[in-house]
Image (cartoon, coloured by chain):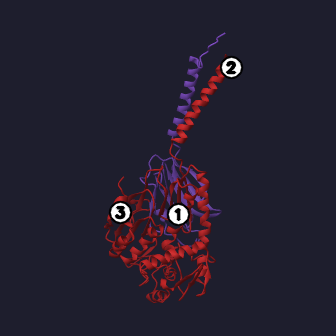
Chain colours: A purple, B red
Amino acid sequence: MNTNPKLFSKRDLFIILVLAIGLGIWIGLKQLSPAAARAVVLVDGKVYKVIPLNKDAYYKIYRGKTYLMTVQTKPGAIRATYSTNWIFPETETNQVSVATGWISKQGETIISIPNRIVIYTEGLKKKTLYDVMTFQN
Amino acid sequence: MKKRNILISTIGAIIVVAVFVVVFVKKSPPKYYTRYGVYIGTDVKIIYATRKGNAKAVINEMFGEFQKYEHIFDPWLFGSELYKLNHSNGKWVKVSPVLLKAIKDAMWLAKLTNGEFDPTIGRLVPLWGFNTDDVKKWRLPSKKAVDRALKHVGYKNVEIEGNKVRLLNGVWLDLNGTMEGYITEMLVKLARENDPNSSGVVDVGGTVGVIGPKYGDKPWIISIRDPRGNPNKAIAYLKLYKGFVGTSGDYERYIIVNGKRYYHIFDPKTGYSNDYLESVTTVSTNAILSDGFGVFSMVAGPSAMKEMAKKLGVAYYAINEQGKVLKNASWKKYEYKP
């Protein structure tokens, strides 16, 4: 019987080391691995659709059955190609959302005030040089 | 021996996890939560982090305030508090503390600028159609109609007594010139009440208020939109640790008739917009000034802007109609070159 055992044997230390390295790698990978590029479409402040930015495609956005906007995607980017006006469906808006063009950086947005739509991106490698933008109100 | 090994390994793993938790949670920067939306006819973005409570819940509470604001400030929304006040036919009206404060703020700036900033231009707005997002309704009104509306403009027609307001001479209030500053200030206050050491920014339609420096000690980088570029194109940048920044311009609500640009900020003396400046960005510790100073400058022009900025202690970055940048000495400390 061993009356004076060491607190940690070599084997114990090896197990602890392996666990620590494993945990370190897991945390590191979690921090470094980027999320897939996608666009989040908000209508009335709620998530309407999350669109993967990995292919060429068109998507239509509706409020209930009312058509609001068409967006086009290509790998790493999204733009509005047409936006209507749900308040005055018979007329046109000033189409600021369409004039915005492609957005391909994290931090850029497409906004349609009359339709209450916000589109922002996540998981893109390129980022804007700013946190927020000031513009006329 | 086997049990002992398992026990020691478990203790070891717990210690390692504890160390990682301490290192990553305590030392790591706060986790920012961001939410976007469209409210009161403009887009809103809030970025927030706190170590006290739940950042997401605080942001949701801030966004919840907009329901209230829409039913107070929209002068064109039938039944809103401001709509009712504008249609009260000269009677005294008891108003909510929120509307009262906003009217007092706007009147303060009107007096300070001797009426160059005037929140009683309400009658002019629908004449031009700028009260709607429908561009087909934006038009150049007749001179006769403008002159008729001008008879009902003048900040001296607003009387305040306690919590009551009276609008004389048929004036209509339109608080858009300072409303976003006011709301931004209220939301910053709400966030700081939750946690005075919290960090983040509130952006209400381009009027930005800093809740606390980024990661505790870094400035927020704010871009200024190019008044003649696409909506995501920046023309300059500034850094802000605290305070407010706002922009006024001629590039979102405008019409061009016979080569002349007419936009939504009216000179209360003429009923038309002036063509001195394309854009004015103002930094101030006062949210009302960061919002309203730009409106004043668009009306009063570069000389008055320079003089008033000195008097009020605000920093500005403006672009005149020839595309030339005008900035005062105070701007230098905010300037950021990426």
Q: Mark on residue A23?
A: none
Please give the chain letter of the residue carrying mark 2: B
Q: Are marks 2 and 3 in contact (CB under 8 Å)?
A: no
**Disc number lying in front (2 or 1):** 2
Q: Amino acid at mark 2?
A: Lys
**Mark 1 and mark 3: Cα distance apart in space:** 26 Å
Dot 2: what SS?
helix
Can you tell which quarter of the image residue A26 is in? top right
Residue of label 3:
B331
Q: Depth check: A80 or B5 in front?
A: B5
- Label 2 Cα crowd, 10 Å radius (few <14 / some 14-19 / many 20+): few
Q: Are marks 2 and 3 on the same chain?
A: yes
Q: Amino acid at mark 1?
A: Asp
Q: Amino acid at mark 3?
A: Trp
Spot occupied by residue B278 in the image (x, y as percentages of width and height): 38, 70
Dot 1: what SS?
strand
Q: Mark on residue B3?
A: 2
Query: Which quarter of the rendering shows the N terminus of chain B?
Result: top right
Spot occupied by residue A46 in the image (x, y as percentages of width and height): 61, 58
Residue for point 52% across, 76% down = B104
Dot 3: what SS?
helix
Spot occupied by residue A123 in the image (x, y as percentages of width and height): 51, 47
Query: If you read the primary sequence from the N terminus, does the residue marked by circle 2 or circle 1 appear first?
Result: 2
Residue for point 49% across, 66% down = A95
Residue of label 1:
B43
Q: Is residue B253 above or below residue A120?
A: below
